[in-house]
Amino acid sequence: MKHITYLDHAATSWPKPQSVVDAVVHALTEAGGNPGRSAHTIALAASRLILEARTDVAALLGVRDPRDLAFVPGCTAGLNLALKGLLRPGDRVVVGSTEHNAVARPLHALEAAGVRVDVVHGDSAGRIDPDDVERALAQAPTRAVVCQHASNVLGTIQPVGDLADIAHEAGAYLIVDGAQGVGHLKLDLTALGADAYAASGHKGLLGPQGVGALYLAPGVEAVELTQGGGGSNSEEAVQPTARPDRYEAGTPNTPGIAGLGAAARFLLAEGDAIRAEERRLTRMLYEQLLEIPGLRVLGPPLGEERVPVLCVVHDRVEADRIAFELDSRYGVAVRAGLHCAPWAHATAGTAECGALRFGIGFGITESDIDLAVRAMHEVCA
Ligand code: PLP
């Protein structure tokens, strides 16, 4: 395979730490039984992997009781569970204006089922003002505030701690899309105060695709979307209510969860250094992109805190064209288009043209940034 300069971490992180790859292989080769079901050695080994992974992911995310974390197929699945499990026809939700389709589409479906959805608009960088949310909550009884922790287009970090306080003051839940927050931001979910926080396993957390986690704060009972076997209370027709079994019907993605557990252990040891390097390289890329004539960087200005995502628009060369040239001529992998987030692009004024996104993450070096910048200069000349 030709050398790839991979700058698409906001879509999915790659390559993964070797310990994650090893953990997936170990799960498939040494612990291939069905966890929580049979009681033989190979099934118990699988159960142990899941227990360890839940404990370690909880430690990484600051979740006091690991049973408050349910493993789900991804952030999208976690958000669907939180939204559809907590909202009923007649409820009202207040939602941010840069949400990903993982929030916008379930809310659209819920709207059709009788949930009222009111959007609070941020500024051109997508920053939501907590006072605007407070004003929106004062207008009508509200069941939930829904907001992303960070934008996959603008890089903007939302004040989710403040939003939790404001939501609770109004008797509402705070549901957070944490896809771009986890891994890139140091988290203590218990202190943050969100009632539901959905995490991707495969982005900043550095785990495999097809796995994620949903945190539901103690006492927040979402109705499960799937009923089925789990190895416990098998004599009863009703879905168990104990956590996490309530939300994990069916055979889990044991190799993926094992990989996620290894990724959590890796980040517990290396996370601070990785985050510092991500911030340094993002700033370096930002500074150098600003020197390219005709190029505009979306989201907060240089110097303001952001997650390691930089979207750019050129006044002459289309984002799709740049992405194609970067890949085919320089082996630089980036993503062009709307990034499944038309709301965020509407906020930035790029809904028609889309943008080109650089996603920084684990393993990227200064020479990767240098190559990407040189390639951008040449393609945009
Ligand atoms: N929310 C945001 C902001 C995202 O960037 C993404 C992924 O692109 C998702 C949700 C969906 O995450 P997953 O791929 O884990 O379902």
Image: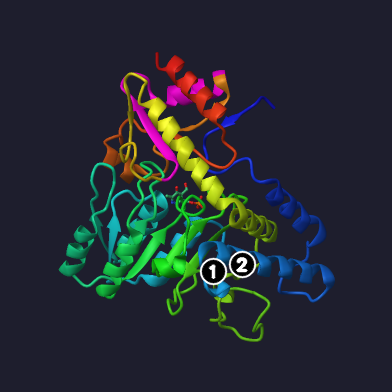
- Say if the magenta span includes residue 316: yes
Q: Tell me the kind of residue under disc 1.
A: Leu
Name the residue furthest bottom.
235
Mark 1: which secondary structure? strand
In this figure, what is the number of numbered marks? Answer: 2
Residues at circles 1 and 2 in contact by the CB criterion of under 8 Å: yes
Q: Residues within 10 Å of mark 2 (few under 14, many from 20)?
A: many
| Amino acid on which disc 2 is placed | Arg
Q: Which residue is mark 2?
A: 54
Q: Is residue 364 magenta?
A: no
Can you give x and y, in whole percent of width and height, for residue 325 in the image?
Answer: 50, 20
Q: Position of residue 87 (x, y in %)?
A: 36, 70
In the rendered view, tell whether residue 238 sits above or below residue 60. below
Tell me the number on the disc at residue 178. Answer: none
Question: Is 234 on the left or on the right of 161, as rendered?
Answer: right
- Left or right, residue 318 beside residue 121: right
Residue that lies at the very extreme toward the right in this rendered image: 41
Q: Quadrant of residue 201?
A: bottom right
Work out how far the residue at label 1 is from the one at label 2, CA to CA, in angstroms: 7 Å
Location of residue 38 with respect to 291 vertically, above or below: below
Circle 1 residue: 69
Does the image show residue 203? no
- Residue at 56% over, 83% down: 238
Indicate the quadrant containing the N terminus: top left, top right, bottom left or bottom right: top right
Please provide the residue range marked out in magenta.
307-329
Residue at 33% x, 56% y is: 108
In-front residue for pair 381/321 = 381
> Residue 148 at x, y = what percent?
37, 55
Going by the image, does 273 lie left or right of 34? left
- Corner quadrant of residue 310: top left
Q: Is mark 2 within 8 Å of ligand 1?
A: no
Q: Quadrant of the C terminus?
A: top left
